[in-house]
Image: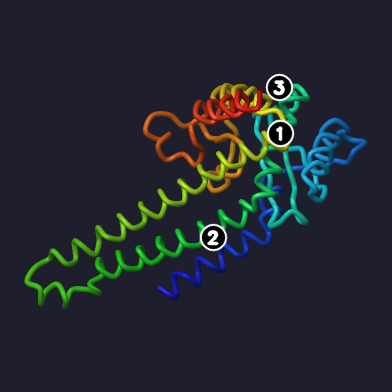
Amino acid sequence: MLIALIFALVSNFIGYWFSDKIVLRMYSAREVTESEAPTLYRIVHNLALGARMPMPKVYIIPNEGANAFATGRNPQHAAVAVTDGLMRMMDEREITGVLAHELAHVQNRDILISTIAATLAGAIMMLADMMKWGAILGGFRRDSDEEGGGGGILGMILLPIVASFAAMLIQMAISRTREFAADETGSRMCGDPMALASALRKLGVASQRLPMDASPQTAHMFIVNPLSAGGIAKLFSTHPPLEERIARLEALAGRRV
């Protein structure tokens, strides 16, 4: 257990500390200045100012898919990135809603929370893998012989599989919860829940028409799932259903009237 925890801790610590550089480079994101992207820069600046946050770095991803994400280990080292496709598809009000959602992730320290969840899940999965191979290679043969059958080995093989599956479900549940929280915080940050709701509708359609060529390991970072998933795959998505997110935002807008 200690070995599994150490491996998971080290790998996720590296990812947490260097997440901004790793992910931005992975998607060839280009940092832009106020003169290069005045509208985008102004929106981010106004939102950060209103939320009393340091101004994050602003990036544009050269991709026709419509999406966005935020990264960075804390508000002092944050960055927000949007795709070319999103900038062309949405009006200023909707872009504001999207960026408010992303800044909400930074404000809520979701990178830290997801790293802790990934560390614990990774430790469970590594431990489960060790147990599985130990059983397959005969590490528990003596105990199972003394018990009078192969039920012990079968149990030691099935238990790690169940443990890994449970760890994955817990990690996804945490990710979905943080998306709901970022929707609510972001809508309050920009003062317009329906702006984000409108943006999510467009993003849902766009993600189906033109999925991004994204890594599954970073899919949870985007505002909507960049991968095309249907059927049973939706049950294992890191994002809650868009319909439910939009309904919650509409309810929030109703309470604000």
Whichever of labels 2 and 1 marks the residue nearer the N terminus, that label is 1
Kindly identify the amino acid type of the residue bearing the numbered disc 3.
Met
What residue lies at 46% left-to-right and 39% top-to-bottom?
237
Q: Badge 2 local density, few (<14 within 10 Å), some, or many (20+)?
A: some
16 vs 78: above or below: below
**Disc 2 residue type (three-letter):** Ile
Give the alpha-carbon distance from disc 3 to disc 2, as whole Å.
Answer: 35 Å
The correct choice, above or below, for 179 with respect to 132 in the image is above
Q: Which residue is mark 1?
A: 83
Which residue in the structure is indicated by mark 3? 89
Nearer-N-terminus badge (3/2)? 3
Q: Which mark is residue 116?
A: 2
In the picture, measured across the screen, residue 163 lies left or right of residue 204, that is: left
Pick the residue in front: 194 or 220: 194
Helix or strand or loop: what does disc 1 sit on?
strand
Question: Residue 159: horizontal and vertical position, in percent?
Answer: 27, 60
Q: Amino acid at mark 1?
A: Thr
Q: Which mark is residue 222?
A: none
